[in-house]
Image: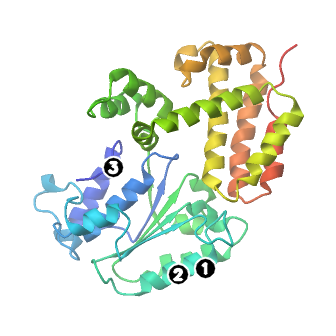
């Protein structure tokens, strides 16, 4: 069975491809953070190596069409792939090369190519997952060009999976050689139902997490397992609320601190910018009389205060600035300058 949830439109497509033996050699999995890209990638790696489903003859994995339901999940290859410890699986991530901490490097791509060139030793297919594929072309061309050669002439029994939060940052020449799987955020009611069905999860907790997760089950499931995640979320929102009405020098100090941590944890910085975006989206909703749609309902009083003190045009401009900053960081610009520019765009209080 597939571990992926909330993506039935893609699972039906993949089941059909597995049944017909028509999997692509490369897929581009795009979607917001924590929507399930890595889970689906590991599901695909398990599907092509599942001992129960038939190994090399992918087209013979299933009997009748109604039986097409992904990897079994119980055999040794499935279990080990989902733990990321399978000999024929390689995960290439941003920061894997300490010399280039903010992107996937040319050396990492070459290692992946060497890995794919060797016949599978434990399973039936070699699988490489590039997590953060948008960084392949960040300020350079060699990693993307090296990968392009593999995509143009892939070895047999090879599956390449590119994971990205920003498909527009992937070179068109690479996109055109991959089958695109766009992961959608789950509807709130569906995510609530998924969470509420878990043992020990009350309806209030499920409803709150479903609202905060914004359709991304990965974040909600992590929050269930780690209560500290919600506390950290609360502390970050408190900081954003304070900074939004702080003097420019305080905001610049924050920007410099955030920029300093970018090389060590790129994704954490991106996640913090998403929180800025969500906070000011809520401010805009309240400003426009749509308070019932805010995600951070626990902070409604603070949001209303900032809505009353800000102009709609300034809020919209700032939201655009956050998106531009995320794109600039993906393009490997100077993080301090990008973040300082964003802090300059924070809406000023109306006198």
Q: Nearer the viewer, residue 170 or 114?
A: 114
Neighbour tally class for label 3: few under 14, some 14-19, many 20 plus, Cα within 10 Å: many
Mark pair 3, 1: CA separation = 31 Å
Snapshot colouring:
rainbow
- The residue shown at (39%, 25%) is 205
Report if the CB atoms under discs 1 and 2 are less than 8 Å apart.
yes
Report if the CB atoms under discs 3 and 2 are less than 8 Å apart.
no
Q: Helix, strand, or loop for circle 2? A: helix
Please identify the residue farthest to the front as the structure is shown.
Answer: 228
Q: Nearer the viewer, residue 44 or 253?
A: 253
Residue 225 pos. (x, y %): 40, 41
**Up-down: is 188 above or below 162?**
above
Q: Residue 4, labelled with which disc?
A: 3
Mark pair 3, 2: CA separation = 28 Å
Residue 11 pos. (x, y %): 30, 51
- The residue shown at (36%, 69%) is 85
- The residue shown at (26%, 69%) is 77
State which tag comes first along the sequence, 3 or 1. 3
- The residue shown at (56%, 60%) is 132
Residue 296 pos. (x, y %): 56, 24
- The image quadrant of residue 255 is top right
Image position of 312 (left or right of 128): right
Asked if one can make out residue 50 in the rendered structure from this viewpoint, the answer is no
State which tag comes first along the sequence, 3 or 2. 3
Q: Helix, strand, or loop for circle 1? A: helix
Asked if one can make out residue 333 in the rendered structure from this viewpoint, the answer is yes
Q: Helix, strand, or loop for circle 3? A: loop
Mark pair 1, 2: CA separation = 6 Å
Residue 128 pos. (x, y %): 44, 71
Q: Residue 111, labelled with which disc?
A: 2
Considering the image in quadrants, where does the C terminus appear?
top right
Q: Badge 1 is on which residue?
A: 107
């Amino acid at each position: 069975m597939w571990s992926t949830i909330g993506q039935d439109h893609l699972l039906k497509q993949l089941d059909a491809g597995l049944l017909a033996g028509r999997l692509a050699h490369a897929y581009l999995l795009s979607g917001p953070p924590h929507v399930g890209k890595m889970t689906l990638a590991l599901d695909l790696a398990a599907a092509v190596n599942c001992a129960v489903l038939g190994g090399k003859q992918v087209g013979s994995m299933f009997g009748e069409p109604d039986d097409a339901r992904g990897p079994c999940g119980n055999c040794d290859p499935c279990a080990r792939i989902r733990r990321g410890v399978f000999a024929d699986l390689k995960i290439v991530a941003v920061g894997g090369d300490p010399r280039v901490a903010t992107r996937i490097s040319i050396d990492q791509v070459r290692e992946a190519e060497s890995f794919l060139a060797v016949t599978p030793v434990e399973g039936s297919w070699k699988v490489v997952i590039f997590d953060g594929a948008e960084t392949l072309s960040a300020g350079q061309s060699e990693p993307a060009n090296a990968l392009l050669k593999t995509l143009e002439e892939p070895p047999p029994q090879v599956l390449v999976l590119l994971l990205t939060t920003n498909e527009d940052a992937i070179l068109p020449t690479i996109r055109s050689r991959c089958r695109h799987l766009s992961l959608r955020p789950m509807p709130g009611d569906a995510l609530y139902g998924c969470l509420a069905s878990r043992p020990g999860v009350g309806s209030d907790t499920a409803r709150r997490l479903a609202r905060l997760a914004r359709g991304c089950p990965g974040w909600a499931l992590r929050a269930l397992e780690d209560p500290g995640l919600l506390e950290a979320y609360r502390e970050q929102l408190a900081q954003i609320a304070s900074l939004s009405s702080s003097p420019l020098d305080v905001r610049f100090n924050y920007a410099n601190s955030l920029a300093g941590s970018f090389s060590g944890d790129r994704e954490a910085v991106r996640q913090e910018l998403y929180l800025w975006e969500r906070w000011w989206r809520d401010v805009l909703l309240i400003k426009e009389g749509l308070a019932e749609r805010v995600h951070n309902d626990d902070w409604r009083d603070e949001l209303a205060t900032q809505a009353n003190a800000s102009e709609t045009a300034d809020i919209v401009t700032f939201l655009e600035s956050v998106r531009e900053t995320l794109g600039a960081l993906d393009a490997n610009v100077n993080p301090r300058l990008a973040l300082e520019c964003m802090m300059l765009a924070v809406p000023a209080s109306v006198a």
